[in-house]
Image: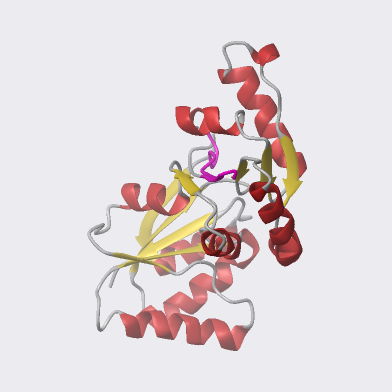
Amino acid sequence: MGTLFIVSTPIGNLADITLRGLKTLFAVDIIACEDTRRAGLLLTKLLEDFAANPADKQKPRLLSYYEQNELQRIPEIIELLEAGKNIALISDAGTPMVSDPGFKLIRECIAQKIPVEAIPGVSAVITALTVSGLPTDKFTFVGYPPRKPGHRMKYFEDIKASQQYIVSTIVLYEAPHRIVKTLEELLSIFGDNHIVIARELTKIHEEVRREKISQSLLHFKKTEPRGEFVLLLHQ
């Protein structure tokens, strides 16, 4: 019986790979990944930058595993694990299953009594939270907002309502082309609250803005938003 390893990968700076993560990625037989091309480039760079003897290392087989093919891939991955293959699951960046597919595979492995091990490491949620200056004793991660306008408004209203029961720092993700719309909706529901916006974390153009929602909205209306965003606010 093989083992499924859940491996966190860097969200930007490759030096953030853990020693255990690096060792695991080159020890498994197969890596299940969202984008095989991107994973291949990552492995090449890790070999170049961190392997003592790159020529001695062999890249594992890459197997595509993403939201659209998840249900079809799970039986194949389970069969490989039952045949004794060790498999690492990675996302494009950060910790797998945090707003990425994977929990259905984990659930099936547990049902089949296949060992699952987590190799901890970088997460954009925790990275942004630690530099935000907002309370960290309790936080609520709510992922990406829905795309449909009606669903989005209810999503934000439900988040605000939840703060009546547990006051916590709210953390969400957003894509650059929707950041202005999201800020407009947050302003209408939460008022001109203090917000922290982290962008391009651990990368060359890392930016962390700490200001009122209205100030962020004005800024991103004047610029071309780029990179993946983490938004944090506290009532």
Q: Nearer the viewer, residue 61 or 165?
A: 61
Front-most of residues 66 and 108: 108
x 41%, y 52%: residue: 209
Quarter assignment of residue 177: bottom right
Rendered location of residue 111, percent (x, y): 54, 64
Is 99 colored magenta in this rendering?
no
Rendered view: 151 above or below 176: below
234 lies left or right of 63: left
- Could you say where residue 23 lies in the image, as x and y percent from the top left? 53, 27
Write down the quadrant of residue 121 in the picture.
top left
Give the residue drawn at x 50%, y 78%: 185
Taking the spot 26% from the left edge, 84% from the top edge, the residue there is 164
Residue 162 picture quarter: bottom left
Q: Is residue 140 left or right of residue 76?
A: left
Check residue 3 for magenta coloring.
Answer: yes
Is 119 placed above or below 74 here?
Answer: above
What secondary structure predominates along the stretch shown in magenta?
A: loop
Q: Which residues are magenta?
A: 1-14
